Amino acid sequence: MQPLYLFKKNNMNISKKDINALTAELSITLSPADYETKVENAIKKVQKQAAMPGFRPGKVPVGLIKKQHGKSILVDEINKILNEALYNYINDNKIEILGNPMPKEDSQVDFDNQTEWTFNYELGLTPQFDVKLDNSQTFVYNTVKIDDELVEKYLKDVKRNYGKPSNPEVAEEKDVLYIDIVELDADNNIVAGGIFKSTSIGIDRLKNEVAKAKLTGAKKEDKIVINANELYDSAVDKSISLGIDKEVAENFNSNLQLTVRNIARMEDAELNQELFDKLYGAGTINSLEEFKDKIKGELALMFAQDTDRKFVEGVEKTLVEKLNITLPDDFLKRWLMAVNEKPLTKEQLEAEYPSYAKSMQWKLIENKIIKNNNIAVTADEAKDEASNYVRSQFARYGQVPEDKEVAKIVDGILSKQEEAQKIFEGLYSKKVLDVLKTTCKLDTKEVSYNEFFGIVE
């Protein structure tokens, strides 16, 4: 016999029965004393607002209101009472649950003929486990080596991003050609009424080396003959660029004549004082060496976030595997099927559930670390975090907002539950990261950019 826990609040009976270590059943029995007053008050509220032919507004007889709306009002109030009773019971008894209470299908409810009902709910319970963190545990903490090669790569991007457009006479491999395309027949004559299209082509985006070779070195007004299959990788590309149906494009393999109308190139910016002032303000950076030092600092900050992210991923993987927390899988699967906004097939659920379960296990571990270390996030911290975020968004466009404007936007963000939750969760995660970095032993190693991001050359 499983333990049965009885609880009585006012006249309402609530009982909890443990099914096993990870699931329990709650039963709530409602009698007229639990709901009659609330239902009567709700009916009076509807009566005051009711408008019906033959009666003055607010003077529709109660009996008529009950006849027309009584059952729906009863059901609404019962649902409110049940919802409040469920979560009060769970909170009062400090029951840690996963997901939400699930109504059981075996509840027999007849609102037409009964005045007392019993509603049954299934609970998924949080498993019992502990997380011990100390310096006997070692986790990998790789950082990106900010070497000269990486700085030069960044400089190359800066020069390209802040370059100036030009129209050279001869095309190079990274230029864009503006062209007229016409269809040719088997003898390379223009097809009357055939394809004619004005478009642009980036030479470096072409995958076919023959096409690249033909277009590199082209001059304005040059006419270049090239096969459609050399110019385009797929029927979809042909269809979009040439303006023809995909079905036609599938079998289209004619030669095309490309007439070069213009050549566009982005000339790299010069690394000079004008650029330094543009990026950081007048006089902030005064030499190429200072610029490189500034870049090294920016790269270090940029990669610090990646370093922490990969570190947490490693800790997550290790702790999830080590603790191997058992979840109420059957309950969670049924709960996911019930609450998912989009219809979810059993096949989809089975395929996606392992990933969801690992995410849930890590969330439980993270919550345990928060509890064990008395981590808390205050409202002021949330405001500061939201404020920093708002200011960073303005800074992206070179703007400095006034404090009043920032405060107004922050209030708007924190007034929305989902947005506020993201802010608080992000702060909790940051504090968990600090605990991990200060409590555990870090195996710190500086690695190259390619090694850090797993890039195979």
Image (cartoon, grey):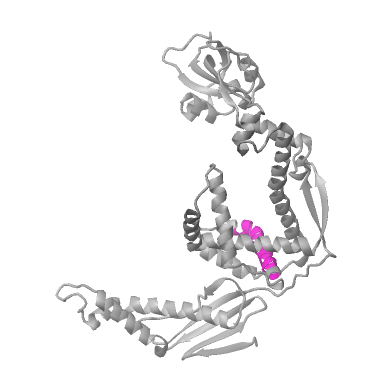
Outermost residue, right direction?
A: 136
Q: Residue at x 74, y 58 (%)?
A: 317
* Residue 19 falls left or right of residue 456: left
Above or below, 344 relative to 110: above
Quadrant of the image occupied by residue 99: bottom right
The answer to whether residue 283 shows anywhere in this view is: yes
135 vs 247, nearest the viewer: 135
Q: Does the magenta portion include 434?
A: no
Residue at 54% over, 42% down: 398
**Residue under the point 54% across and 74% down:** 101
> How far from the left and from the top, in percent, is residue 56?
16, 76
Toward the left, the furthest residue is: 54
Say which residue appears at 59% left-offset and 57% top-offset: 347
Report if residue 232 is visible in the image: no
Residue sitting nearer the eye, 321 or 218: 218
Principal secondary structure, stretch drawn in magenta: helix
In this rendering, the answer to whether 135 lies above or below 46 is above
Answer with the quarter of the image where residue 173 lies. Answer: top right
**In which quadrant of the rendered image does the N terminus lie?**
bottom right
* Residue 218 percent across, percent down from the top left: 59, 13
**Is 66 placed left or right of 304 in the picture?**
left
Q: Is residue 430 left or right of residue 420?
A: right
Left or right of residue 443, residue 9 in this image: left
Highlighted range, magenta? 349-368
Question: x, y (%) of residue 175?
Answer: 60, 22
Q: Is residue 365 magenta?
A: yes
Q: Is residue 68 above or below residue 284?
A: below
Q: Position of residue 334 (x, y in %)?
A: 57, 67
Residue nearest the observer in this picture, 275 or 92: 275
